[in-house]
């Protein structure tokens, strides 16, 4: 998937999420299905996953290369990344990444801030994606807590799907 297509899909998935969250009854922000995250926690989780990616992509590329190495394989396409993520989710059997365990329940006053931050971080990621060279997108790798090390292009495509995954969960269960 080329850079512009990745930026476009990030925009589309994020807009779908934000539109749904803005239309949702404010009373439901702090509620969720029994034993599951609240709507606010879902949004906070997405913010917690995109912010570190943007932070990493702001670092000098040589530091990323030094810290995590270089890709030793071809970049997978979007559908393959999605399928691998779905497979890994099944293997994880509902376990949650350490950073998202015991997550606080954001109150309604925090909703606007979280949604604004999601929008800003998504725009930053789109910008960084378009600005980064194809070589760096394909050869630099970053660690993913569930998927292991992934080329940057794949982790950005995964981010788009991650937004879609949580949007679908919200639409179906909240």
Image (cartoon, grey):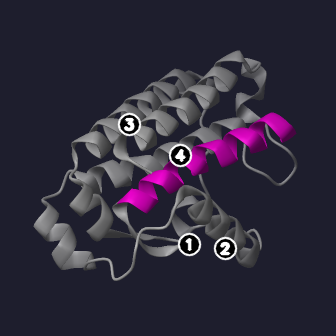
Q: Nearer the viewer, mark 2 or mark 3?
A: 2
Tags 4 and 2 touching, CB below 8 Å: no
Could you tell me which secondary element the residue under label 1 belongs to?
loop
Residue depicted at x 43% and y 48%? 50
Could you tell me which secondary element the residue under label 2 belongs to?
helix
Q: Which residue is mark 2?
A: 88
Q: Earlier in the sequence, mark 3 or mark 4?
A: 3
Q: Nearer the viewer, mark 3 or mark 4?
A: 4
Residue depicted at x 22% and y 77%? 67
Structural crowding at the residue carrying mark 3, measured as other residues with C-alpha within 10 Å and reported as few (<14), some (14–19) or many (≥20): some
Image coordinates for residue 4, horizontal then vertical, percent: 37, 38
Q: Which residue is mark 1?
A: 146
Q: Which mark is residue 160?
A: 4
Give the CA distance from mark 1 to mark 2. Answer: 7 Å
Count of numbered circles on the image: 4
Tags 1 and 2 touching, CB below 8 Å: yes
Give the CA distance from mark 3 to mark 4. Answer: 12 Å
Tags 3 and 4 touching, CB below 8 Å: no
Residue in the foreground of this view, choosing between 54 and 45: 54
Residue depicted at x 62% and y 24%? 108
Q: Which residue is mark 3?
A: 121
Residue 11 as seen in the image, left or right of residue 32? left
Structural crowding at the residue carrying mark 1, measured as other residues with C-alpha within 10 Å and reported as few (<14), some (14–19) or many (≥20): few
Image coordinates for residue 170, horizontal then vertical, percent: 76, 38
| Rendered image quadrant of residue 41 | top right
């Amino acid at each position: 998937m080329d850079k512009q297509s990745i930026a476009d899909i990030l925009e589309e998935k994020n807009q779908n999420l934000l539109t749904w969250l803005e239309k949702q009854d404010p009373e439901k922000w702090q509620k969720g299905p029994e034993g599951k995250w609240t709507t606010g926690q879902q949004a906070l989780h997405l913010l917690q996953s995109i912010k570190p990616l943007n932070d990493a992509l702001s670092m000098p590329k040589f530091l990323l290369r030094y810290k995590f190495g270089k890709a030793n394989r071809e970049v997978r396409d979007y559908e393959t990344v999605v399928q691998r993520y779905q497979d890994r989710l099944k293997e994880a059997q509902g376990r949650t990444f350490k950073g998202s365990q015991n997550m606080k329940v954001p109150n309604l006053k925090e909703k606007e801030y979280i949604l604004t931050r999601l929008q800003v971080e998504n725009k930053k990621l789109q910008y960084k994606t378009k600005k980064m060279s194809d070589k760096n997108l394909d050869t630099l790798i970053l660690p993913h807590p569930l998927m292991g090390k992934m080329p940057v292009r794949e982790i950005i495509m995964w981010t788009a799907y991650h937004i879609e995954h949580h949007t679908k969960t919200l639409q179906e269960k909240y």
